[in-house]
Every structure is written in C-alpha cells, then in structure tokens.
Amino acid sequence: MSDDAGPGDVPDLLADLEAAHRAAESAQARVDERGAERLETTAQCYDRLRELFDTYEEEATGDGDFRVFIEFQEELGQFVEGLPADLPHRERFEEVDDVLQQRRLTESDFGKAREILSPVADDAALLEERNATRSRYEDLRTRAERRIRELDERIADLEDLQSLGEADLEAPVERLQEPIEAYDDAVAEAFREFKREASARDVLSFVEATAAFPLVEFRQPPAKLTGYVQNHPPGTEPLPTLLEYAGYSNSKLDHYVDDPGALQTAVGSCQTYVRRLDAEPLTVGWPPPPAAELRFRVRELIQVTGRFAPEDVVAQLRDVRSLTGREDYDRLRQSARAREQLDAEERERLRSGAVGDELAAAREARADLTDALEELPEP
C-alpha cells in the first residue's frame, strides 16, 4: 500500500486558500467602490481604443501610409464621438483624440496618448485584478476539493490496512483457497482446450457473447478478425491453426487457403490478441472478492462457463458459490488478504502505531479542508 496522498501539503493549501479569498474580496470591494458596471463600460471602451492603436500605430506614424493615417484619424474621431456622455474619463478619450488629430504623428504622440489614458488603464486593471484573484480563488477551491477526495481514498486505504492488521494470520484460509484454486485451474485448462480444439468461429462467437455479462470482462475481439472467421472457410479451423497460417509465406499459404492476403490482413495483425486470449476473465483469483460481489459474479460465470466447459468445472464453480454462505467467509478472506498484501514494512508500521498516526493526521487534514470550504463563501 502506498504512502501517497498524505496530508503534508494541507496547511500550505489552507493558507493559500484563505489568502486567495482575502485577495478576491479586496479586489471585489475596489470594483464595487467604483461601480462594476461603469468600470466594465470603461474597460470595453479602453480595449477598443487599444485595438485601434495596435491596428494603425505602426503605419500611421512618421512617413507611413497616408491612406492608413487618414483612415485611423477618421475611425478615432468616430469612436470618441460615439462614447457615452456619462462615460467615466470621457475627457481623457477626448484629449487623446485632440493629441492624435494632427497632420503628422510620431511615436511620442502615441506615448503621450497612453500617458493620458493611464487613469483609464488603472480602472480597467481593477477588473483584471478582480477576475485574476477570483480565478485563483476558484482554482484553489477546486484543488481543495480534489485533495479532500484524495484524502478520502487515503483514509479508506489506511482503514483497510488497519483492519488487515487485526486479521488472524493463522486462520485456516485453505478452506476458501483450495476450492477457489481448484476451480481456477480447471476453468483455465478447459478454456485452453476449447481454444485449441474448437473452431475460431465458435471461440470468437463465445467471447462476443460474454459482452452481455458485465462481470465477465473479456476484451472483445477486433472486428476485422471476427469478420474474417465468420465469412471465410478458414474460420472453421482452430485459432492456433490460424496463427500458424499467419506465419506462412504467401506462396506456402496459398496451398491452405483461397485468399492468403485476406488471412494475413485479418489474422496477421491480430496475433497478439489471439495469443493473449485466455481464461483470466473466468477465474476468481486469490484473495477472493467480498462475499456479495463473488455471489453476483459466480451467477454470471455459471452461465458463461456452461457454454464451453465440462459439467464438472461448472460444479466446482457452484462449490465456490457455496463458500459465500459460510459464517467465517469474511474472516477467512480478511486473513487471506493480510497474508498476501501485508509486507514486512507495513506490519512494522502497524505494530509501531504509525498507521494509526497517519490515519489520524489524514482525518484531521480532511476535516480542516472541509471546514474551510464550508466557512469560505463560493466565488
């Protein structure tokens, strides 16, 4: 089990979150003091004027394009004339128009215009500051929410580790292990035989049919492979035979199939899938899952394995299902998990009380973050 997602960064995150909230509140207060709507109107006009500068300044200055020079002054004049009468700093925009309505413009004229507009820029900056501080505050709240989820996972892991530490390592887990491993071995062998002896068409049809059973998680075969085996005579051959064919040269393969190119395209590109196709999705595994989960899974496995495996394999699966009714199933499963999952380091952490300390720290950090998010207002 990992030590990741510990609470060490939470104090810094809390401090950043509270500071970001104060900054956002302060920036909003400055905007409210000036009037958000008036500032937004001013900022929009300021942005439009900057666009005019960006578009025309280079060509309208010095010995630039005279046509562009005239066009700029006309657009500037129309822009200033169209400004709202009650626009804050309207006189600044008018002064800029006066400065730039000359027969010849220089870079210093535009510099002077920007200097005149500095109070307007300051007002627009209030909105930018409000938006930036609000965005940071939102981002930090999102980070805090994510850390809470991570701490939830960490707490669950530590609680699980503690429960494993309480398990009886001497419990007779073979009462579960022997029937489960007997079934897993039997179904693995049955599937190997099925894959080796049955036609590729039947095997792939079986795998496709398992899609109706969500707890039996076979990777579905590539469409080009199933299309080939369903529609070409070599589909009646077993999958190992098709793999063997895929390794032949076209001249040799021509003696075995009518369309060597089609086989190479369909089977040759899917060799990894065919080789890896095994009974793993049909096995229970060790340690086993919780009783309720195993009961549901066995219900589906019985329907699936019965389509290809001998009856004695299905009978072994029913024996596995009966294990979930044992009163000591949970205790034996927990003991099995402890034996399999606890390494020497984790056992020492449990013995020393370090796990309990980590769990307490994670719970405290989670509570601090939760309290902070509840106390601090939404952006």
Image (spheres, rainbow, N blue to C red):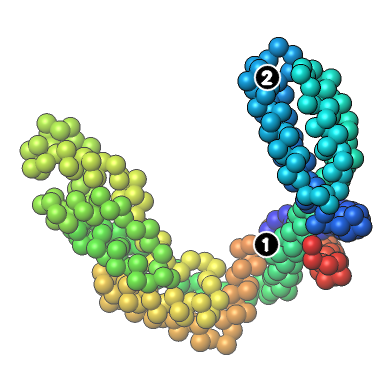
Q: Which residue is mark 1?
A: 342
Q: Which residue is mark 2?
A: 59
Residue at 29 percent across and 63 percent down: it is 208
Q: Nearer the viewer, residue 90 or 310?
A: 90
User: Which element type, helix, strand or loop, lies under badge 2?
Assistant: helix
Residue at 74 percent across and 18 percent down: it is 61
Of callouts 2 and 1, the N-terminal one: 2
Q: Position of residue 343 (x, y in %)?
A: 68, 58
Q: Nearer the viewer, residue 190 or 208?
A: 208
Residue at 30 percent across and 59 percent down: it is 192
Q: Position of residue 239 (x, y in %)?
A: 23, 52
The residue carrying pointer 2 sits among few (fewer than 14), some (14 to 19) or many (20 or more) residues within 10 Å by Cα, namely some
User: Which element type, helix, strand or loop, lies under badge 1?
Assistant: loop
Does 106 sit above or below residue 76?
above
Any part of residue 161 in sight: no
Any part of residue 252 in sight: yes
Quarter of the image where one finds residue 213? bottom left
Q: Position of residue 264 (x, y in %)?
A: 21, 40
Does 41 sit above or below residue 71?
below
Q: Amino acid at mark 1?
A: Leu
Q: In which quadrant of the rendered image does the N terminus lie?
A: bottom right
